[in-house]
Each structure stands twice: as C-alpha cells, then as structure tokens.
Amino acid sequence: MRSIWNGAISFGLVSIPIKLVNATENRSISFRQIHTSDGGRIRYRKVCELEDEEVPTAEIGKAYEDADGTMIPITDQDLASLPLPTAKTIDIVAFVAADQIDPLQMDTAYYLSANGVPAAKPYTLLREALKRSKKVAVAKFALRGRERLGMLRVVGDVIAMHGLLWPDEIRQPDGVAPETDVTVRDAELDLADALMDTLGEVDLASLHDDYRTAVEELIAARADGVELEPERAPAAGGGKVIDLMAALESSVRAAKEARGAEAEAAGGDVTELRPRKEAKEAAESAPKAAKATPKETGGKKSTSTAKKTAASRSTKSTAAKKASGAKSATAKSTAKKPTAKKATPRKKAS
C-alpha cells in the first residue's frame, strides 16, 4: 500500500518513524458527464469572472471570502510561516478508555506502518502497551495543511489511527428528537425485543453493496450490447405507522419466516422465539399448571387405576410372549399373576 504521509509518533521522549497508509477505500462507481447527443466528455474550465478567460493552474491562488464578499488573499508562504508543531509528528497527548471517544467524532481511518528496521522495537512497544492497558491514545497531527485530532488503537498486529473531528465540529442535536410526549407500552417493547432477538446477529463481512453489484451488471451488459429487463423497485417504506402493534407483529412474523428459510437452507433447526414477557409468563405458569392437576382420592379410584395399569401391562406381556412363540395358556396365567400381586397391596393401602 502506498503511504500518503511520512513522519513520526511522539511518545514522550520516544520517537517512532512511521508511514501513514489509508485503511479504507471508496468502492462506489463514479461516472463522467457527457454530451448526450454525441457522447463527448463535459469538462470544467477555471475561468476568471473579471476577464472571462481561462486561467492556468500556476496563476491560481487562494483567498478567504469575508462576510461582505471581500476577498482576502492568503499565500502558501503565509500559511507555511504559521507555527504547526505537528507538521511531521503524531503527538500523543493522552491515553483514555475507548468508550470516552464519541463515535460521532470518528473520521477517516489509517494504518501506521513502522518506517525502517530501527522503528520496529519502539513501534512494537507502543502496540503492546496499548494492548495491555486496554486504552487508546489521543494525538494531534497535521495533514493536508491543517491540524487534526486522532485516536490510535491496535488492530491485530498493527497500530491504526482514526482521524477525529474536533469537539466543536460536532453539532448539538437540538430540535431533532420528537417534541411531543410519547408513552411506550410494555407490550410494544416486548414485541420490539422479540423482533431484535429474531433478527439476531450478523457477520458484517457477509454484507455487501447490492446496488453497486446491480450497477456493475448494468455496465457489463451495456458494454456487451445487451439490454437488461428493468426490475420493479420495492415499495417505498417509512410512511406513517397507523397501528404500531400490528406493524411490530408483522415484522416479527416476517423475520421468523426469513430466519426459518435461512435455517432450512442451511439444514439446521429453527428455534421459535416469543416476546420476552410471553415467554416469561409461560415459564411461570408451567409448574403451576402441573401442581393444579387434581389428584384422585379414595380407594376405589386408586384400585381402578391400578387394575387398568395392570391390565395394560398384562396385554403387552401377553402380546410379547405370543410373538415369541409361547403357549397362549401359559401367557394368560403369567399375565394374571402380576395383576393380582399389584392390585392387592393397593387395596390394603386404601
């Protein structure tokens, strides 16, 4: 991977020469603007609005536009003369717990590569220190003409750095949350929990951009001179929810069906999931139902039950002996004996 910045990590008095490498890449498909009548490329030209003439790059500078529209010229020399101590250094300023970093601050991710053999030892030292402390490093660095904030953490055997937005660059969510008072019932939360449980977890590596795949297929087909049949787009969602309970129940049902289809395709079993409240009530009522079963009392009922049980066992014993070729008379006498023995003590007990 090509490095985009060379410098060093400043870790107290320790300096670690490193190279900065992009950890992510944009896979979205880009298009060019063309003249639809003849397919010619449409290009932008930089034109001075005062002279109405195209200006070469060498003659283009920069300026700050004031509130009244006045242009205040700023040269590269002016910017270079400003103090920027982190121009070639990633200066670690603190070590904090990872949960202290607001995910809203996360920006571009980079890999930090040890630059040369001498850098391997201090690089490994910092990496192992971060691992053992279970903390991340907060640092300042400069890139593309401005000072930035970064977070260093360990990814496998590599130190990665996430660019962070400055705290004052995070907008406050004023007026974003619903302003009306809303009451959520327990039954609705139970169904939401059931939906979450049914959807379960996902391997993020298995997710992909379906739209990009469709665009690639369209481009390949068009290049081969083939016209693809347009697919009907799914109905747009996100409309007004009239019945929240019905929508949740339908979502749980659909998620269960999809989960069952996936399990069937994989050859596994499907575990039926119920809302947590319903499952809890079912678990609590099960032992109570068993205890609530009426017991038969009285000697006659017990004797009758014993006789029925003995007769059933006698029938099974007789059938088994007939199948083995024993005499029928012997089978009957044998079957009667256990019946009498079992019935007698139950009568005494009653």
Image: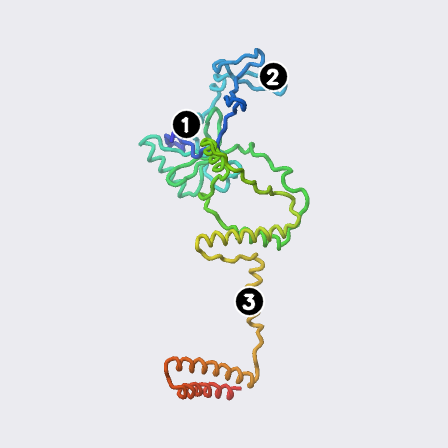
Mark 3 vs mark 1, foreground winner is: 3
Report the residue that reaches farthest toward the top.
Answer: 51
Say what amino acid the circle numbered 2 marks: Thr
Q: Quadrant of the N terminus?
A: top left
Q: Are marks 3 and 2 in contact (CB under 8 Å)?
A: no
Residue drawn at x 52%, y 58% as measured from the top left: 272
Q: CA distance from mark 1 to mark 2?
A: 35 Å
Query: Would residue 322 be found to the left or right of residue 66 on screen?
Result: left
Residue drawn at x 64%, y 53% as measured from the top left: 185
Mark 3 vs mark 2, foreground winner is: 3
Which residue has dot 3 on it?
286
- Asked which secondary structure carries label 1, the reply is strand
- Compare marks 3 and 2 and give the one earlier in the sequence: 2
- Compare marks 3 and 1 and give the one earlier in the sequence: 1
Which residue has dot 1 on it?
5
Comparing 44 with 112, the one in front is: 44
- Asked which secondary structure carries label 3, the reply is helix
Number of callouts: 3
Say what amino acid the circle numbered 1 marks: Trp
Residue 38 location in percent, x, y?
Answer: 52, 22
Using the image, determine if residue 258 lies above or below residue 210.
below
- Asked which secondary structure carries label 2, the reply is loop
Q: Residues within 10 Å of mark 3 (few under 14, many from 20)?
A: few
Residue 323 visible in the shown view? yes
Residue 278 location in percent, x, y?
Answer: 58, 59
Say what amino acid the circle numbered 3 marks: Ala
**Colour setting:** rainbow
Residue 97 visible in the shown view? no
Which residue has dot 2 on it?
70
Q: CA distance from mark 3 to mark 2?
A: 80 Å
Using the image, determine if residue 154 lies above or below residue 44.
below
- Residue 180's disc is none
